[in-house]
Image: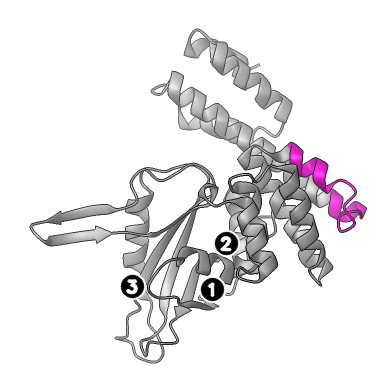
Amino acid sequence: MGVFDQAARYATEEEPEAVVNRLFRGAAVRPRFHEWRDTRTTPRPGDPDRTADRVAALVDDNSPHPPWLLLAEFQSRHDPDKLDVTLVEAGQLRLRCRHGDDRQGKYKVLTALIYLCDTCPEPVLDMTLGGAGTRHKPLLWIVAEDNARETLEAVAGGSLTWGMLFWVPLMSGGGDPVVVERWKELASALPERRRRGDLALVVVVFAELAGCAPAWKQGLEGWDMTESAYVNSIIQGAYDRARLERAREDLQRVLRTRFPVALTPEVIATINEQPSLSVMDDWFEAALGAFSWEGFLAVLRR
């Protein structure tokens, strides 16, 4: 799991109501989060990776039916196969999960796509013909389409929960210094120091993905909730790891554009295992300037 997906899953696990409410905004029904189907926790960004908790049980207080299952997938870049993947995952969940003591009681399963960056050009997988067939339409949240200032004021007014603070750097206007200052005001009002530290940790990771890391790094300098050397070291480590992952993604995207046939799994593994950001920067420049695949490989093998 990449650091951006890890941050998203951690933020969702810490405050699931924020994500559930956002996914159902404007819907005729408003289910609420009930519980995670798997109680294993997602590590904080920068901690060792573990199996993520992605499946939530939702309940509708106005309905006598059993809970729904919600399978959420996070996208830092658009994956053209993700609709197919979520359709398969939904089928597997419905097949193997049962509610209560009824071995025949199958859950209804919803899927959700949460785009941390980029957008979803095809939000529906329509395989119907003559009124029959399969139509797969996940819930969709493109975070960049939300307005950062409006979100912060909604949190301040109580119409959105504090958990939306995690997602602000990814939103429209999320790198505005005014937004950063307002975010700090609201985060500082939270009662738990750990919660404030975790918010800061996640937002610097998201800010790197959104391309507004300098504004957040500068804005959080000297913030009274992150003055300890321990918290600062965690944030710096998460920030550095996010930059490295972003550099890996950017390099592979350039190589797929320039040399799509020649990009082998071995080269991809070499890129993903490179721990030095300065080396990644050199490889990126080489990928842009190489006249041939062999020319790039010569740089890669130095």
**For residue 261, which quarter of the picture?**
top left
In the rendered structure, the answer to whether residue 136 lies left or right of residue 265 reads left
Query: Magenta stretch containing residue 285, yes or no?
Result: no
**For residue 198, which quarter of the picture?**
bottom right
At label 3, the amino acid type is Arg
Q: Secondary structure at mark 1?
A: loop
Q: Residue under label 1, please give it.
A: 38
Q: Secondary structure at mark 2?
A: loop
Callout 2–callout 1 Cβ contact below 8 Å: yes
Callout 1–callout 3 Cβ contact below 8 Å: no
Q: Nearer the N terminus, badge 2 or badge 3?
A: 2
Residue 186 on image: x %, y %:
76, 62
- Residue 24 or 232: which is nearer the viewer? 24
Mark on residue 51? 2
At label 2, the amino acid type is Thr
Residue 128 on image: x %, y %:
16, 56
Q: Label 2 to label 3, Cα distance in Å?
A: 20 Å
Residue range in magenta is: 214-232
Residue located farthest toward the left when viewing the structure as drawn:
130
- Residue at image position (67%, 69%) is 157
Q: Residue under label 3, please give it.
A: 94
- Residue at image position (19%, 54%) is 127
At label 1, the amino acid type is Asp
Mark toward the viewer: 2 or 3: 3
